Amino acid sequence: REVEVDVEAMDKAGNFIGWLFVDNTNLSISLVEAGLSQVHFTAERSSFYQQLTQAEEQAKSKKLKLWANYEEPKHVVVVEETERKCNYKKVIVTETMQSLSFWAQHVESGGQLEK
């Protein structure tokens, strides 16, 4: 078969980054459409990114190969407190070790522990 290789760049290791066309068809898009691969985040810089993401969405909706057991992530709303609340307690360090371990007790419960 005759193929066409479109080299866009080279990575730090000297590997080619680009596209392989077979019969004027982008092989990367074909693999994603068939559910045999997924879009890598580095494709965002590519001129084929929109086509790749559309192909991936179609493969997901059809549950092809990689996407056979795929479930859309559930959107969980996380409510963050506006201000961090600190709950400081007074302690007395009762013992320290060379291994950087230490023991402490709450000042409030000191009298109870002595009984």
Image (spheres, rainbow, N blue to C red):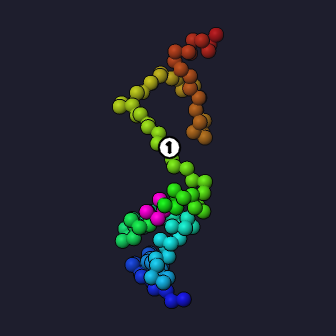
Residue located at (36% from left, 30% from top): 83
Q: Residue at x 43, y 77 (%)?
A: 18
Residue found at the very far bottom of the displayed protein: 2
Image quadrant occupied by the C terminus: top right
Q: Name the residue under label 1.
A: 74
In the rendered image, the quadrant that contains the N terminus is: bottom right
Residue 6 in picture, x, y percent from top left: 42, 82
Is residue 14 visible in the rendered structure shown here?
Answer: no
Residue 82 seen from this side: yes
Q: Residue furthest right?
A: 115
Say whether residue 54 is magenta.
yes
Residue 13 versus residue 110: which sits nearer the camera?
13
Q: Which amino acid does label 1 sit on?
A: Lys
* Badge 1 element: loop
| Residue at x 50% of width, y 72% of height | 30
- Say whether residue 103 is left or right of residue 83: right
| Residue 81 part of the magenta-drawn span | no
Main SS category, magenta section: helix
Give the magenta range: 53-57
In front here: 105 or 95?
A: 105
